[in-house]
Amino acid sequence: MLSQTAEYALRTVLYLAARQGDRLFRVSEIAEELGIPQNYLSKTLHILARAGVLHSSRGKNGGFRLARPANEITLAQVVAPFSGPTGERICLLGRVACSDSDPCPAHAKWKAVSNQVSSFFGETKVSDLQESPVARVKR
Amino acid sequence: MLSQTAEYALRTVLYLAARQGDRLFRVSEIAEELGIPQNYLSKTLHILARAGVLHSSRGKNGGFRLARPANEITLAQVVAPFSGPTGERICLLGRVACSDSDPCPAHAKWKAVSNQVSSFFGETKVSDLQESPVARVKR
DNA sequence: GATAATCATCACATTGTTATGATAATTTAA
DNA sequence: TTAAATTATCATAACAATGTGATGATTATC
């Protein structure tokens, strides 16, 4: 459903959300903890920073943190830069023009499902996916 | 949402469903009508035939037709050979083990949405997407 | 049979995504 | 002001998806 890259982004954001507030986190430590190739994650997080989801600082003692509180970041904002299924609904049959007024045969049925996916990403906040401390310890 | 290949498959199946009964259809004519590269479509339809969705005949006057009535073919069966989002629900965070009893933080919310997508593909029949003759003429 | 039509398959080119490593730019701190 | 740490960026490799061209296999018809 999500591309590999979008999944990395989401996992990193959740990782940072769970530890928010105290300090900046280096790419090297995030990458090691989450099992993601470091240089690839570096590029991915850079994109997230440009998108305004993360804040980055270069140089010694630099690193990444969330740019805003976790309850002000939607999943859509996290995966959008990696062309997740978050954006506008796309015609199932690939028609360039497919709308309520000029629908493809799948339009009505697909729209309902597609809207559910869109609103999941658009309305779910990062904070909605934070595990409680207890649950996190349990794992 | 669907890969290009899966979209080709679905469009071809709908094309055949709209003309079902009379005869076999050559790859060349389907490809031209739908604007799909012919050799690529040939490969794709061969896969659909092996999957039991289409029937193919070789040789002169050969071609493709639906293997079963359009109301007995689900969208899932059409896109499954091309790894559409039809199969089992996949963990949004990429965990190999993610279940009701061992859920990732996104599990509960994502499951509900994901089930909707699965059941759309699993329960919608090809016949459900056939345009009425009137609508088809209108286009 | 011979021929033409047609699907099946092989080989390869092109493109996009994912991944890796190397280097540049920036910042802190000694 | 220099050195070390760290993100930013570049180059490129590996792989999968997509597309193209050529050839093989099968069938209907003459």
Image (cartoon, coloured by chain):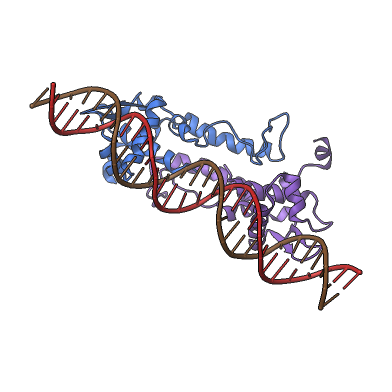
Chain colours: A blue, B purple, C brown, D red
From the top left corner, tell me how far across and down residue B98 is, in percent: 40, 49
Return the residue nearer the eye: B108 or B28: B28
A65, B59: nearer the viewer: B59
Where's residue B68, x and y in %? 73, 59
Nearer to us in this view, D11 or A35: D11
Task: Answer above or below: position of A18 versus D20.
Answer: above
Is B63 placed above or below D11 here? below
Q: Position of residue A69 (x, y in %)?
A: 35, 24
Image x and y of residue B139, in percent = 80, 36
Q: Can the viewer see residue A115?
A: yes
Q: Is residue A127 visible?
A: no
The answer to whether A76 appears left or right of A56 in the picture is right
Q: Say if B90 sits above or below D1 in the image.
A: below
Q: At 64% across and 63% down in the image, what residue appears?
A: B50
Q: Quadrant of residue A95?
A: top right
Q: Which residue sits at x=83%, y=42%?
A: B133
As rendered, which of D13 and A13 lies closer to the eye?
D13
Q: Which of the 4 image quadrants contains residue A17? A: top left
Taking the image as shown, residue A127 lies to the left or right of residue A3, namely left
